[in-house]
Image (cartoon, rainbow, N blue to C red):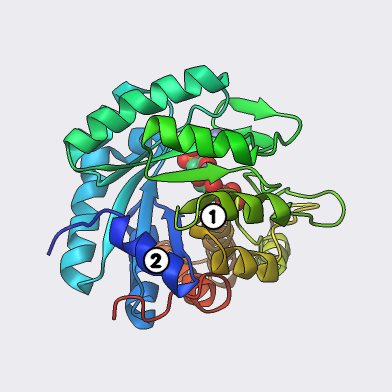
Amino acid sequence: MALVTTTEMFKKAYEGKYAIGAFNINNMEIIQGIVNACKVKNSAVILQVSKGAMKYAGPRYLKAMVDAAVEETGLDIALHLDHGPDLATVKEAIDAGFTSVMIDGSHLEFEENVKITKEVVEYAHSKGVVVEAELGILAGVEDDVHAEEHVYTDPDQAVEFVERTGVDSLAIAIGTSHGAFKFAGEPDLKFHILEEIQKKMPGFPIVLHGASAVSQDHIAMCNEFGGNIKGAQGIPTDMLRKASAMAVCKINMDTDIRLAMTAAIRKAFADKPEAFDPRGYLGAARNEIQSLVEKKIEEVLGSENSMN
Ligand SMILES: O=C(CO)COP(=O)(O)O
Ligand SMILES: O=C[C@H](O)COP(=O)(O)O
Ligand SMILES: [Zn+2]
Ligand SMILES: [Zn+2]
């Protein structure tokens, strides 16, 4: 049993009109909550690690736990670097045993983005690792970069970018954004851009970042037990399901995991103020993450039984 790349996963997902969930991991309970859900649903999954997560937990600790998850579950799991900022970080992830990396040159000029992506593709492919890149800019905060406005992906540029870089999948901007505050008014995604890209590059896997749905139940639960989160809004579930039936093969979710975990821990503290065993509240968080991911597989991804 070993980690896999996303090549086969994406091929099956494209043909089967579903998407694979890519969930950010930072510790053991998050990993276990996610893979327990995938085991129940018999679903392949991508576990992804940001530069911040590498710094927090250490890539080797995370890799070792993900290896254990593969052994325990027998599932197809890819370990992916999320928003790799440069070749050095990509190399660090590949050296640690990641099977997939993202190079995020979306904030660079087009030619610079092509250049850095090509370099990463060359290095990663020589190690048997697949590469995701990004074209277009998501509004909002992303690590230390902040963008006021969406810069939607241009479909013709997307074709040129993929041809020139040899990248394996592409993240595009159609109106999603990172974090819990995605829309001030009505949610709006530019599906015509996705459609056009799909028409121009049939069979090529597209990635959707910033795709958390931001459960109002979890927001309410956080706020009921001492939190203060106002005006949070995510991507409606039906829009995500629509995208996953199109060329979108990978849907990134982190905020939803954070909210589930925080809601469960806040409730556990409030329910038992006398308790101080971390297994109590971290166990509650793990269970909440598991239910969340099971629901995602059913309602958003459609990846149930993708292991068959
Ligand atoms: O895109 C993401 C990670 O790369 C996560 O997006 P969310 O903030 O919507 O969960
Ligand atoms: O896109 C970013 C992910 O949500 C990861 O966030 P992070 O960089 O705070 O770990
Ligand atoms: Zn980006
Ligand atoms: Zn992202």
Residue at the spot 71% in from the left edge and 47% down from the top edge: 175
At mark 1, the secondary structure is helix
Q: Position of residue 47 (x, y in %)?
A: 36, 55
Query: Which one is in front, 158 or 20?
Result: 158
Image quadrant in which you'd find residue 215: bottom right
Give the camera-side residue of 204 and 277. 204
Circles 2, 1 touching at the beta carbon (< 8 Å): no
Q: Residues within 10 Å of mark 1 (few under 14, many from 20)?
A: some
| 84 up-or-down from 229: above or below | above
Up/down of 252 relative to 166, above or below: below
CA gap between label 2 and label 1 equals: 12 Å
Q: Choose mark 2 or mark 1, whichever is in front.
A: 2
Sequence-wise, which precedes: disc 2 or disc 1?
A: 2
Mark 2, secondary structure of its residue: helix
* Quadrant in the picture for the C terminus: bottom left
Residue 49 horizontal/vertical position (percent): 38, 44
The residue at which mark 1 appears reads as: 258
Q: Residue at x 17, y 37 (%)?
A: 127
Query: Visible in this render: residue 26?
Result: no
- Amino acid type at image mark 1: Arg
Which residue has dot 2 on it? 34
Q: Position of residue 46 (x, y in %)?
A: 36, 57
